[in-house]
Amino acid sequence: MKAETINNWWTTALNIVVLSIAVAILAACGGGGSGGGATAGSTPGVASGEIEGFGSLYPTLKAGVGFESETMIFDILGGVGYLWNDAFTATTYSGDLFLRLKVDQKGVFTVGPHVGAIYFNPDWDGTAQVSLDSDTGIVGGIAFTVGSPRVAFSAALDYVSAEFDVSTSGGWTANESKLDISGFQVVLGVQFRF
């Protein structure tokens, strides 16, 4: 093997730190992304409240390692995020695997599938005394990048599957035992490769 070939391989191998900053709009909050919500009521005639949700904002910060060949890019990322909507907020921890094919030789445009897991630690934001249990959901979809090999705009169209067990106290009752946040999300962000 020539020294130049070894140096090129190491340059590619050392190009492994990936930083992704993204904001997702999760089109789900109870009711599988088509609206819905959650209702909690106390003693009949005393108090009742309903929160409907049609979307969530979900900023994330991810970092990891990536491997690049002439035809594809494979990234392994871990991250943290914060999901909020009208019903609840949740800190999140995630892990993702991305496999993107280079549409052109320079990698200016890439496209491919990804799959991952998201751990949600939710808190109910309504006035009712409602608790939501933590859950690990799954996410999968198709990801795109456009830009230079070092800095690129990223986008993904994903499906997220997750639900939280609902418990109440203080005389409140919930109309559902689970809050399903499954639905589609659109992720837009910026990706840096070092």
Image: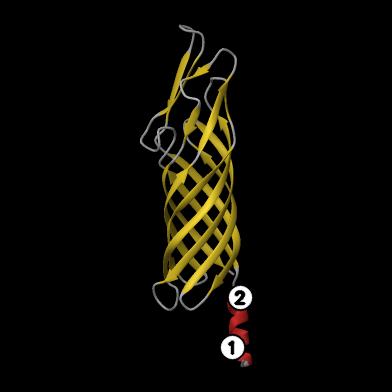
117 on left or right of 148: right
The quadrant in which the C terminus is found is bottom right
The percent position of residue 181, horizontal first and vertical second, equals 46, 37
Residue 21 falls left or right of residue 6: left
Q: Residues within 10 Å of mark 1 (few under 14, many from 20)?
A: few
- Pointers 2 and 1 in contact (C-beta within 8 Å): no
Name the kind of residue labelled 1 in the image: Thr
**Residue shown at 40% from the left, 41% from the top:** 27
Query: Residue at the top extreme?
Result: 45
Q: Which residue is mark 1?
A: 5
Residue where numbered disc 2 is placed: 13
The residue shown at (60%, 79%) is 11
How far separated are the C-alphas under marks 2 and 1?
12 Å
Quarter of the picture containing the N terminus is: bottom right
Q: Position of residue 127 (x, y in %)?
A: 53, 21
Most extreme residue toward the left, as rendered?
34
Residue 70 percent location from the top left of the image: 48, 79
The image shows residue 39, relative to residue 11, as above or below, that is above
Q: Secondary structure at mark 2?
A: helix
Q: How many marks?
A: 2
* Left/right of residue 34 with respect to residue 149 in the rendered view: left
Query: In the image, residue 172 lies at what x, y percent?
Result: 54, 15
Question: Circle 1 — which element?
Answer: helix
Residue flagged by tag 2: what amino acid is it? Answer: Ala
Q: Nearer the viewer, residue 92 or 113?
A: 113
- Name the N-terminal-most of marks 2 and 1: 1
Q: Depth check: give the residue in front, 148 or 43.
A: 43
In the image, residue 141 above or below residue 16: above
Labelled disc at residue 82 = none
* Residue sitting at x 40%, y 33%: 31
Nearer to the camera, 27 or 125: 27
Work out whether residue 135 or residue 129 is closer to the camera in this orientation and state it: 135
